Amino acid sequence: MTEQSSYRVVDIPLDRSDEMLDVDGWAFANTAQVATVDILKGVIDWDRARGIEVADAAVAPVGTMVAVHSSHPYEMRVPGGGTVATSGLTWVGVHSGHRRRGLLTRMIDDHFARALARGEVVSTLYAAETAIYQRFGYGLACQSYFYGGGRGPELREIPGSDDLRLELVSADVDKHSQIVRDVLARVKRPGAHATIGDPLMRDLFIDPELWREGAEQLRFAWVSDAEGPAAFAIFARKLGWTNGAPDGEFGMWTWAAATGAAERRLLSVVLDLDLVAKVKMRNIPADGPFVTLLKDIRSAQFTVRDNIWVRLLDVPKALAARSYGADADVTVEITDKQLPDNAGVWRFAIAGGEASVTRAEGPAQVTIPTQELGAAYLGGVTLASLADAGLVTGEPAAIAALSAAFVGDQLPISPVSF
């Protein structure tokens, strides 16, 4: 048997979930504890879980699961406020004993083909290791700030913000999932989830006591305005003492706000809770209200992190889903090793905020690898900057026109990790 035929791609039904968790344990150096197994099974979309098992007894017992992945379907917000059908790749892992055999490539190919068959024209992911997925055409479309600082950073006033209703309670997915959905439906920033499925929602609220390491149970805060829920946060504190003084830590990993007033109201409260000395918060857009409203920007200990990685699966449909800030008419050569239907020369005819992408003849004015097209897709990374780095090539005037068209009004961010 060839190495390729020594393995076969299969569905992973719920009754093989223990095998999926075992492979995940090898890939991410962890072992699911008995008390958490059923919880973990609830955050995977089993209709979309796929794996690779051994087909050759010379390799390992036939049927042994050695690689796994799944995905989350959602509508992702794009420049202009519209959405695009998206497949969020997740739970990717290869058993340590079967690496370097092309299994990850087979899984990515399978993911691309199945997403396209479902009409999902964009794939996204959060990368455990950033170098891995670039070879499959994923581009870093969002950079974000991670905030580590002291309690209660002082924020400038927004009229009416302090009057908005805020509630603090213990987190409960059954009680609060609709609030999360209502807020996300109002968030127009590119990269955000406009919709979210039940498995991913359960993942946001996952909170086994074994994982808390002395922290409190997850808490939930939300802000309401005249239109309904306008901001939410899922967070927890961990109490500590140093020389008799409180030295607690606050961590907030999932949050979103639809308006600046709601964001200020939310953060002015949850970042200033009693007995906390250190605050940690992620997925902050560099141009977001929190950064803009900080009175002392120097006191904020910001670290730049990668956020969402984007891969276009169907170039014409993906580009037609978003809007554009300037007109351009440019021929573009796209290079795409994994999806040859995307490769070749295209005419990008952009007018009145809309794009028509059709096949073209002859030499192209601009050459864009698919990784760079994914990076620029949400409007936060300019084609001009990619050209300065030598990653996009071609006629300077054509690059400038296309770059101006692709720039968005807001930097993108994905507030939901998966």
Image (cartoon, grey):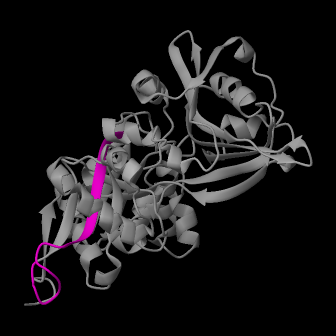
Q: Specify the farthest residue to the front.
A: 34
Tell me if residue 394 comes above or below residue 403 in the rendering: below
Q: Is residue 151 left or right of residue 397?
A: right
> Quick one: which residue is furthest to the left in this view?
1
As drawn, is 163 to the left or to the right of 70? right
In this view of the protein, which residue sits in the foreground, 53 or 166?
Answer: 53
Q: Position of residue 256 (x, y in %)?
A: 55, 34
Rendered view: 210 above or below 5: above
The range drawn in magenta is 55-77
Question: Measuring 57% from the left and 73% from the top, which residue is drawn there?
Answer: 389
Residue 145 visible, this orientation: yes
Image point (25%, 76%), residue name: 103
Question: From where the camera sits, is residue 364 visible?
Answer: no
| Residue at left offset 54%, top offset 57% | 382
Residue 169 horizontal/vertical position (percent):
58, 22
Give the left or right position of residue 310, taking residue 262 as reference. Answer: left
At a point 37% along the width and 71% down the height, the residue shown is: 26
Quadrant in the picture for residue 351: top left
Residue 413 or residue 379, whichever sits in front:
413
Quarter of the picture holding the N terminus: bottom left
Task: Let me know if residue 249 is in the magenta part.
Answer: no
Quarter-of-image position of residue 359: bottom left
Residue 260 in the image, given as x and y percentages of width and height: 65, 27
Give the percent coordinates (x, y) of residue 84. 32, 42
* 156 relative to 48, above or below: above
Q: Nearer the viewer, residue 25 or 308?
A: 25
